[in-house]
Image (cartoon, rainbow, N blue to C red):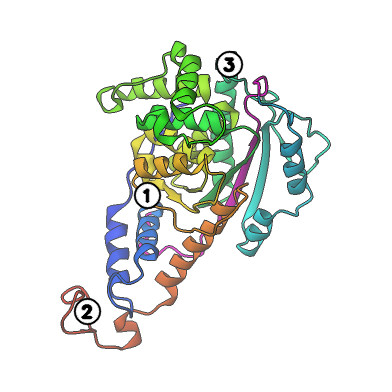
Amino acid sequence: MRTFKVEPLDTQAMETCRFRIDNLTKPIYSLATLETIAERFAGILGDPKPNHLRQGVLVVAADHLVDGPQNDQHGSESYAAIKRFNEGRTATQGAAAKLNAVAHVVNVGLEQDTSDLTNIEQQVIRKGSHFFGVEPAISRDELERALELGFTYADKLHADGLQVVAIGNVGERAFLDSLVTTATITGCAYEDILVHNEYGPTIEQRAAHIHSFVDRFNIAVDDWSTISESERRDAVLHLLHIAGGLDIAFLTAFILGAASHRMAVVFDNIVTGAAVLAAVTIEPLVKDYVFPSAAYDEPIHDEPIHKEQCRFLGVKPYLDYKLLIDEALGSTMGLSIIDASMHMLNDMKTFVEAEVSVAEDGAGKGRQKNKE
C-alpha cells in the first residue's frame, strides 16, 4: 500500500468559525448538527468560513462470494442496478444533479460483464471476490490493485477540485464480508450483530459456522490499541485480503487518500461503513474527515452491523428516511445536510451584521458580542 499522510484539523480555523456560529442571530447552539458540521469543515479546509463546497459522488461496484453456496443470482441484480446508472436514471444521480455533484460509477468487480455499458468506468480487477470458506476473498495482488485504484481515484477527484465526496456501492452478497470486517475491527462478537431468523440455524450456530471458516486465517486482534501503527496497518490489510472484498478495499484506500488531500467523505451503509472502520483503524485521524449520513430501513440483518459501526466510531446518522435502496443514495442526500450547514454559516447574519443586540443573560452571555 502506498504511503500517505493525514494532517490534523486546523483548530484555529475551527475556533474562528465557532465564534461566528455562536454570534449568528439565533439562540446559541440551537442548530446543533449543522453547527458542528460547519465547524469541522472549517478545520478540514483550513478556512474559517467555507462556502460553495465542490461535491461529488463515487459509487463502486463489486460482487462478493461468487463461488459460495448462496450465489443463485450470478450478478443479475447487480447488472440491472449498474445498467440503471449507465442510463442515468437512478435516484442517486437525480439527487446528485440537484447538488451539482458529478457522479462517478466504477466497476471493480461485478460478476457479469459490463463492457457494453459505456457510461460506467471500467476498472475490473476480477469478476467478484471469493467466499472465504473456499479461499481468501481476494489475492494479495488483487488487494494491492484495489488499494492503488482507490488512492488513484482520491487523487483524481482531488485534482478535479472536489472537497467532499459521497460514497456508495453496488453489488450482491456483501453482508458476510461486511459483518466479519466490522466484528474483527470493533471487537464485538458475531452473535451481537447477527439477527434471529425464525427458520434455519440459531444465531449461535451461524456464528460458529462463520468462525469455522475464518478462524483458520488468524484475522482476530485481541486489542488494536496495544499494537504499533505498522502492525495495525498489516492486520487490516490481512483482514481485507481474507474477508474484505474488492469494493471495501477500494473504498478503504479512497478514504485514506481523500483525507490526505483534506477532502471529506460521506458514508452510509454497511459496506461503506466497513471501509471507514478499516481506514480509521489504519489512521485514526481519518475519523475527523468522515461524516455519517443515512440510517437505512435495510434488510433487518444489516441494521445491527451499521449500528455497531456507528457505535464504534461514536457517530449518529444525520438522516432516517426509511430508504429501501442504498447505491449511495443516503450518502448523496447527506451532501444536502452539509450544503445546509454552509448556508447557515454564510447566509445568516451575526448580531453585529444584523445590528441586533444580543441577550444580556442566558447561555450565550459572554460569547455573543454586540458591535463595539
Hey, which residue is sitting farthest top in the picture? 216
Question: How many neighbours does mark 3 have within 10 angstroms: few (below 14), some (14-19), or many (20 or more)?
Answer: some
Q: Does 75 sit above or below residue 262?
A: above
Residue range corresponding to the magenta coloring: 46-69
Look at the image and tell me in which quarter the C terminus lies. Answer: bottom left
Q: Position of residue 228 (x, y in %)?
A: 29, 22
Residue 23 shown left or right of residue 104 in the figure = left
Residue 149 or 361: which is nearer the viewer? 361
| Residue, disc 3 | 139
Residue 340 in magenta?
no
User: Disc 1 to disc 2, how far (Cα)?
Assistant: 32 Å
Q: Position of residue 184 (x, y in %)?
A: 40, 27
Q: Amino acid at mark 2?
A: Lys
Query: Which numbered disc flags the more N-terminal residue, 3 or 1?
Result: 3
| Residue, disc 2 | 369
Question: How many neighbours does mark 2 have within 10 angstroms: few (below 14), some (14-19), or many (20 or more)?
Answer: some
What numbered label is drawn on residue 315?
1
Hey, which residue is sitting farthest right in the picture? 116
Which residue is drawn at the image coordinates 72% and 44% (left, top)? 81
Query: Which numbered disc flags the more N-terminal residue, 1 or 2?
Result: 1
Give the quarter of the image for residue 247: top right
Residue 51 in magenta?
yes
Q: Is residue 1 visible?
A: no
Most common SS among magenta residues: loop
